[in-house]
Amino acid sequence: MENMQFISLIWLFPLIFMVHDFEEIIFQEWWFNKERSALLKKYPKVAGEYEGISTAGFALAVSEEFIILLVIALTAIVFQWYYLWFGTLVTFLIHLIIHIVQWAIYKKYIPAIITVIPAVIYSIYSIRFVYESCNMKLLFGIMWSIISMIIFLANLFFAHRMARKITRFFRS
């Protein structure tokens, strides 16, 4: 299933991911400093996470995830192995939905909320298009989505650990 629209949707994923994460990278530190006291009162555990990660540390974690997405996109196109890419996109969509829930709970701007809507639209369209174009089996789509979630949750812990270490390095 190698048509231009199909390949474009696959390569758009890392681009959409970066645009979304640019908002987080650019506004995370400013937002946290502005909202620090409210976060410490309402969500002390979340506040502790943000305090431990600088903009540089967060950007490093995002760049590591971006490289993984590029490898997954390249693998999907070169080897026509779409299930991992599909599962990763489903995982990203769930990540976006979590941002929407965070925003609804916090009831104020959070870094990432502006880019969530276009990213959700892209994700839903791409998931549907690729699922139908590849005649994917629902069970395999679900299985690869679960596998992708496990991989990216493990990577998220690794990336946050790496981000904290970089933050400590730059602050010392």
Image: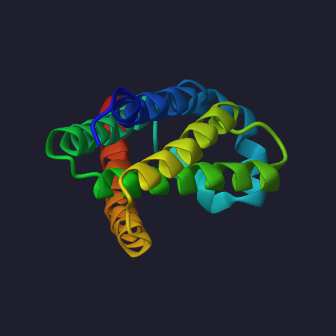
Image quarter for residue 61?
top left
Count of numbered marks:
0
Q: Position of residue 96 (x, y in %)?
A: 59, 48
Task: Please name the residue shown 46% across and 57% down the image.
Answer: 91
Q: Position of residue 119 (x, y in %)?
A: 58, 37
Whole-percent x, y for residue 85 in the image: 33, 50
Q: Quadrant of residue 114?
A: top right
Name the residue: 73% across, 32% down.
34
The residue depicted at 77 percent of the width and 59 percent of the height is: 42
Quadrant including the C terminus: top left
Direction from residue 115 to residue 141 in the image, left or right = left
Q: Nearer the viewer, residue 5 or 77?
A: 5
Extreme residue toward the left, this view:
79
Front residue of 72/1: it is 1
Compared to 79, does 42 lie above or below?
below
Q: Is 44 on the left or on the right of 93, as rendered?
A: right
Image quarter hosting the N terminus: top left
Q: Position of residue 148 (x, y in %)?
A: 35, 62
Q: How is the rendered protein coloured?
A: rainbow
Relative to 59, residue 71 above or below: below
